Image (cartoon, rainbow, N blue to C red):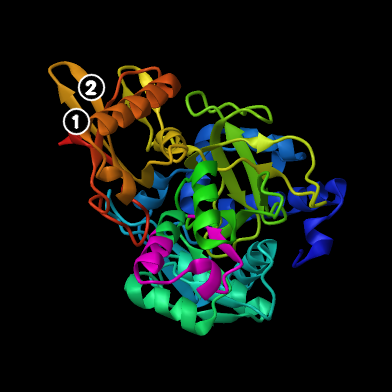
């Protein structure tokens, strides 16, 4: 299903002509309007007028989250505050907030992109969208809200929290589309079953659009089985626009980037050089149409790749692989790069465990250690000690075969690992304390 087939299936040559035109325009505008970009361009000896092909983007300096923090609050805006109708900001838990703004046209574009995203999951004007993404300074909730309203669907703006009430409303209001983080969708399913509901019979859910955190194919399977839905991955980040940058279609073989509005690159995070299609690296985005705060070659720190070839759905826009982790989420343990998603994939293949886990990293003497705490399901936790020891050994072997480092595995009682109503907390790194 398409929301805007003419654009989503546009001929590649025409699409790239449009991208180049918009790239030239946005580079000229930020050089004129945003002092930070003018300084960066001048320091690198880059003249925006020198861009004659999309490949010339590699000559443009990168921008980073640190640039946004240094420009706090409004120094990266390319328009006056009089033209800004919406301001969002990050929590600022690791420093100053990153602040983003939207003009009326930016809001209209956002709604269009989220309509495409929701349509990818089969959303129509007949649907009821249960929107459990957070509202407020976080961009997720309002992005989904705009897209659903543009389609003409009924929106339940429930936001996060009060899980018991969320479950009741999903059942009573006949929600058909669920929008939240993947970890929270599992929590909702678990809570529904505890409350006596059978999601397959008591809910009308048919699909879910899940993002804001990396998740594995194994977790997708768990969600689809527990809630009896189609689960698609969506991608976005506040600095670029919010959700709506890319989304899977029903084929589930990569996220289609809305290339008429964003230029995507993959780079080697160490060298900054562009990586060939199919190679994992750091995703970099340039916003081609954002008016209030255009972002140029923004280093997302998200790890993914551009998938070569075409999709059976006939969309022509580039596809990115599902995000496998972040350069700043990555754990380095005894010289080995470890992503939580690698461990999650192993755990979700083991039927005796629940999809809730915590990674605890400590330094004992001069050696880093990794402990994997994972919940055992109700029916297996009461097994004899010998059986539980065998399960621990099984999990340890599976993880060590993937990571090639030794780990400690600790089985814990059901529901003892703290649940999240937003992004799940997966890592406790005690080396930083």
Residue 190 is one of the magenta-drawn residues: yes
Could you tell me which secondary element the residue under label 2 belongs to?
strand
Tell me what residue is drawn at x 49 percent, y 47 percent.
219
Q: Which residue is mark 1?
A: 431
Q: Which mark is residue 368?
A: 2
User: Marks 1 and 2, Cα distance to the nearest angstrom?
Assistant: 8 Å
Give the answer, above or below, for where 154 lies relative to 268.
Answer: below
- The magenta segment is 187-211
Of labels 1 and 2, earlier in sequence is: 2
Residue 166, horizontal then vertical, whole percent? 40, 75
Q: Is the residue 385 above or below the residue 98 in the image?
A: above
Left or right of residue 9, residue 223 in this image = left
**Front: mark 1 or 2:** 2
Can residue 148 be seen here?
yes
Disc assigned to residue 212: none
Q: Which residue corresponds to the image point at 75% horizontal and 48% vertical from the top-left?
A: 20
Where residue 74 appears, as percent x and y from the top left, is: 41, 62
Residue at the extreme front: 384
Q: Front-most of 357 and 141?
A: 357
Q: Which quarter of the rendered picture does the C terminus lie within?
A: top left
Q: Position of residue 87 (x, y in %)?
A: 43, 70
Q: Are marks 1 and 2 in contact (CB under 8 Å)?
A: yes
Disc 1 on helix, strand or loop?
helix
The residue that appears at 84% across and 46% down in the rendered structure is: 12
Rendered image quadrant of residue 430: top left
């Amino acid at each position: 299903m398409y929301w805007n087939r003419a654009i989503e299936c546009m001929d590649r040559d025409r699409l790239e002509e449009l991208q180049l035109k918009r790239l030239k325009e946005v580079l000229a505008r930020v050089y004129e309007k945003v002092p930070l970009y003018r300084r960066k361009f001048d320091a690198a000896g880059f003249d925006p007028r020198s861009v004659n092909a999309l490949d010339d983007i590699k000559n443009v300096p990168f921008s980073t989250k640190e640039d946004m923090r240094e420009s706090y609050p409004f120094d990266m805006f390319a328009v006056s505050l009089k033209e800004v109708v919406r301001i969002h900001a990050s929590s600022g838990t690791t420093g100053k907030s990153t602040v983003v703004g939207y003009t009326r046209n930016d809001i209209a574009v956002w709604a269009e992109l989220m309509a495409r995203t929701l349509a990818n999951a089969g959303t129509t004007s007949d649907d009821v969208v249960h929107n459990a993404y957070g509202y407020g300074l976080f961009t997720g909730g309002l992005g989904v809200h705009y897209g659903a309203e543009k389609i003409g669907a009924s929106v339940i703006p429930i936001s996060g929290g009060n899980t018991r009430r969320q479950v009741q409303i999903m059942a009573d209001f006949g929600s058909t589309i669920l929008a939240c983080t993947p970890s929270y969708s599992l929590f909702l399913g678990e809570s529904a079953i505890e409350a006596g509901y059978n999601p397959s019979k008591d809910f009308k859910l048919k699909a879910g659009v899940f993002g804001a955190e990396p998740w594995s194919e194994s977790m997708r399977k768990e969600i689809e089985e527990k809630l009896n839905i189609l689960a698609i991955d969506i991608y976005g980040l506040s600095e670029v626009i919010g959700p709506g940058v890319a989304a899977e279609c029903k084929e589930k073989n990569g996220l289609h980037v809305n290339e008429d509005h964003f230029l995507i690159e993959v780079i080697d995070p160490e060298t900054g050089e562009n990586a060939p299609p199919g190679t994992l690296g750091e995703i970099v985005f340039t916003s081609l149409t954002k008016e209030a705060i255009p972002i140029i070659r923004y280093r997302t720190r998200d790890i993914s790749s551009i998938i070569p070839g075409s999709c059976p759905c006939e969309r022509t826009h580039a596809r990115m692989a599902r995000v496998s982790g972040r350069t700043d989420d990555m754990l380095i343990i005894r010289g080995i790069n470890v992503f939580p998603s690698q461990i999650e994939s192993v755990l979700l293949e083991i039927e005796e465990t629940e999809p809730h886990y915590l990674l605890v990293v400590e330094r004992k003497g001069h050696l880093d250690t990794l402990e994997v705490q994972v919940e055992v399901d109700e029916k297996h936790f009461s097994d004899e000690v010998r059986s539980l020891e065998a399960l621990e050994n099984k999990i340890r072997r599976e993880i060590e075969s993937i990571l090639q480092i030794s780990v400690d595995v600790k089985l814990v009682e059901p529901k003892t690992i703290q649940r999240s109503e937003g992004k799940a907390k997966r890592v406790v790194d005690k080396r930083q304390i």
